[in-house]
Image (spheres, rainbow, N blue to C red):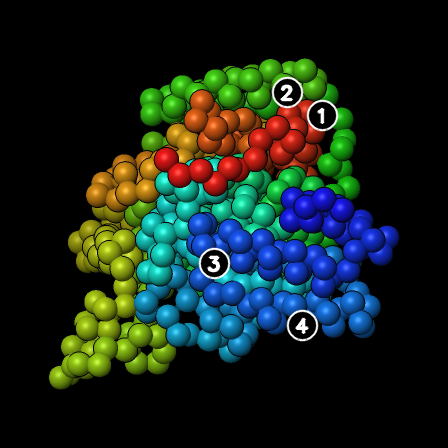
Amino acid sequence: MGDITRLTVHELKDMLDKKEITSEEITKAYIDRINEKEKDVQAFVTLTLDEAEAKSKKIDEDGRNGEYAGIPIGIKDNLCTKGVKTTCSSKMLENFVSPYDATVVEKLNNEGIVSLGKLNMDEFAMGSSTENSSFHITKNPWNLSTVPGGSSGGSAAAVAADLVPWALGSDTGGSIRQPASLCGVVGLKPTYGLVSRYGLVAFASSLDQVGPITKDVKDSSILLNIIAGHDEKDSTSHKMEKVDYTKNLDKDIKGLKIGVPKEFFGEGINDEVKEKLEEAIEIYKSLGAEIEECSLDVAKYSLAAYYIIACAEASSNLGRFDGIRYGHRAEEFSSLKELYVNSRTEGFGEEVKRRIILGTYVLSSGFYDAYYKKAQKVRTFVKNEFDKVFSKYDALLTPVSPTTAFKIGSKTNNPLEMYMADICTVSVNIAGVPAISLPAGVDKNNLPIGMQLIGNSFEEEKILNAAYKFEQKLNFREKYKPDFRKE
């Protein structure tokens, strides 16, 4: 049978269908793997291994009620899970147990998918390295002294380390794609409104989107099939016909028009990253795709606009954590104001405080027009630029991260340098379009390099098809795997 935890979800499903394996055997293999490797990676915040084992046993006894029933998963800790802690990796919600399930979690449960636990993240999804968790820093399994990226670093590291076969993450400015790139896995940020945000603890409501982190592109399309769809509980959820994202994966991409925006390959992009993407372009040419350099001058405007909009919305969304209704409450206070101040001072970490202050500033009287209103105008400009470029191309090819995984602690004293890690990803969230990150190779230190394919709104099928054909040609998973080294 080999190592069960190395298998993809579609491989596991085939074995379950043929009765070559039971759900309990799969779950136990992952539990053993977690017991062996979690101490090194620290991808989880809360483990639910006993419950997972009991659920998988019951699925074997009662019969599978869904196509992917009996397959384990990991869930980012900002998605509400009934009866299980949902902490957002913050001291503010350290002991919060959600009374309900997020819509995406409900869909997993209806499918019979087994949760192994909640995955670590940057506190309230604010960060690019998972160093901002209040509990512990998740390590990158390719090199344990480097970061896994963020904010879905726990999700990406868990999939890369084979602690889970797939995971859910959330992406506000690159938080699925950037850790997927740094950990050598596949991360998909769907079109805004395609997947329900109900039960996702909000960071920046107009930018957040839930999406899959998986071992390969086929698994990504399978998980998107499960979680996508209209939800009346989410006012931003889009009504559209059900699409099977696995249907056109293997379609020929001859004649597919791929634009390569030159501005995304400028200053700050590591030479090895550029080199791997140039090799990727050659692979696409060999597959019959039409590649053309184009111009999309939005990256430098997007980063500034993103941090203004995201921080403004964060300061508004985090206002609910006041020490009164739920969440951390200070023990010492002499007035209502002091209760607010002490609870928030103790409950929030440095990065969250930084963004609340910035967001409150840009929304304040006298600065609203100068910053927030202007950022919203830039947002319209960015969306229009994407519309223009998609009138000509089917997809865009860019880097995901300017560099490979950086050393833990190397950027913590320089927030601006950390924010620059999002330069290639934030414009996608501002425009609300879909994008996928998939491995394009490794650098000289054997650290993964990701490639980003961006599509037009609700055209996930196109980018999944293009990603799948590239993945089949490159065979990344057969050539490379994490070695858990420390250096």
State the residue lying farthest toward the right. 18
Question: To which residue does mark 1 refer?
Answer: 253
- Residue type, numbered disc 4: Ala
Q: Is residue 404 left or right of residue 82?
A: left
Question: To which residue does mark 3 refer?
Answer: 44
Q: Which mark is residue 284?
A: 2
Q: Earlier in the sequence, mark 3 or mark 2?
A: 3
* Classed neighbour count for the residue bearing mark 2: other residues with Cα under 10 Å, few (<14), some (14–19), many (≥20): many
Distance (Cα) linking label 2 and label 4: 46 Å
Q: Is residue 358 left or right of residue 428?
A: left
Number of marks in picture? 4
Q: Residue at x 40, y 39 (%)?
A: 486
Provide the secondary structure element on which disc 1 rests. Answer: loop
Distance (Cα) linking label 3 and label 4: 20 Å
Marks 4 and 3: in contact by CB < 8 Å? no
- Residue type, numbered disc 2: Tyr
Q: Residue at x 73, y 53 (%)?
A: 242
